[in-house]
Amino acid sequence: MNQSSEFSLRNLLGRIGFWFLILLILFYTLFPFYWAFVSSLKTENEVFQPATFFPENPTVINYESAFQNTQFTQGLLNSTIVSSVSVGLALVVGSFAAYALGRLEFRGKTLMLYAVLAMTMFPQISILSGLFEIVRESGLFGQLSSMILTYPIITLPFTVWTLTSFFKGLPAELEQAALVDGANFFQTFYLILLPLTAPALVTTGLLAFISAWNEYLFALTFTTVNPSAQTVTVAIALFSGRISRQEPIAEIMAASVVVTVPLIILVLVFQRRIVEGLTAGAVKG
């Protein structure tokens, strides 16, 4: 076997190994969603039978039951409101903070930036008791506003840290040209720099939305006295079946699929912006 044949064989084996690894990763990441979708199409009796990869008698009764559950539909609306508003607050506040940390020079900037990063390292349970007291004393306990005001604690540090690197990478000549043309600092930020960070805003906004949409601990704790304010994650966890003492596994699976679909749609709609946001700054010059 000559050298070119050996090279072709190694190249072929490398490609086979590469695609095998890709398929393995796809199976590992997509199979749980596939299993949830298949289970949502089964009857409750079939769910408790030996596992099958396809439903014997597909049915949408579980989806009908999920949408007939007023607590679930109210939870969808609550999650949409809470996630959208909290992400909006995180992007507004985070963009101003990122502009200051990325473009301005002041004492203690590096320490402040690492303090923001350190905030992401604390688990939610470690700050829950303190937040609970604050929410209760402020009169927001059991209301949507309790989650709207506390979710940015989770989403804001990541937003600030990510946007700071984007603002820092923008050419200084843009600000100088805008100032020469008579724009003030706010106009320069709002009209010149902020539109250039659109990929970063979309990427961080989407990731923050997913984090807020999937949040469970704060939502469960702050809405125990008011079920009408519970988000969809709590509503699914407290799902009750159509029949007394029923384990509504298939209905829970159907509700989980419904909750996942909006996130998939958002990723598909903004996938180009997401790729731009994740790859921006990777190549210099």
Image (tube, rainbow, N blue to C red):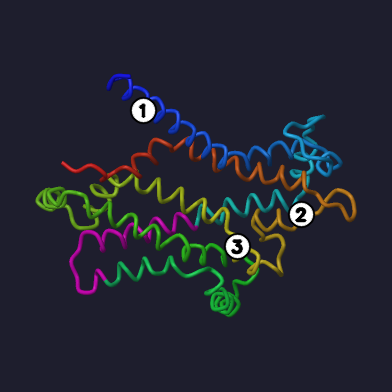
The residue identified by callout 2 is 239
Contact, mark 2 vs mark 1 (Cβ under 8 Å): no
Say few, some or many: other residues with alpha carbon within 10 Å of mark 2 (under 14 / 14 to 19 / 20 or more). some
Q: What element carries label 1?
A: helix
Q: Residue at x 63, y 72 (%)?
A: 141
**Residue situated furthest left in the rendering:** 180
Q: Nearer the viewer, mark 2 or mark 3?
A: 2
In the rendered image, residue 79 lying in the magenta stretch gets the answer: no
Please name the amino acid that badge 3 sits on: Leu
Q: Distance between the residues labelled 3 and 1?
A: 59 Å
The residue identified by callout 3 is 144
Say few, some or many: other residues with alpha carbon within 10 Å of mark 3 (under 14 / 14 to 19 / 20 or more). many
Contact, mark 2 vs mark 3 (Cβ under 8 Å): no
Q: Is residue 86 left or right of residue 6?
A: right
Please report the bounds of the magenta region as a residue range.
86-110
Total count of labels = 3
Q: How far apart are marks 2 and 3 (CA)?
A: 20 Å
Contact, mark 3 vs mark 1 (Cβ under 8 Å): no
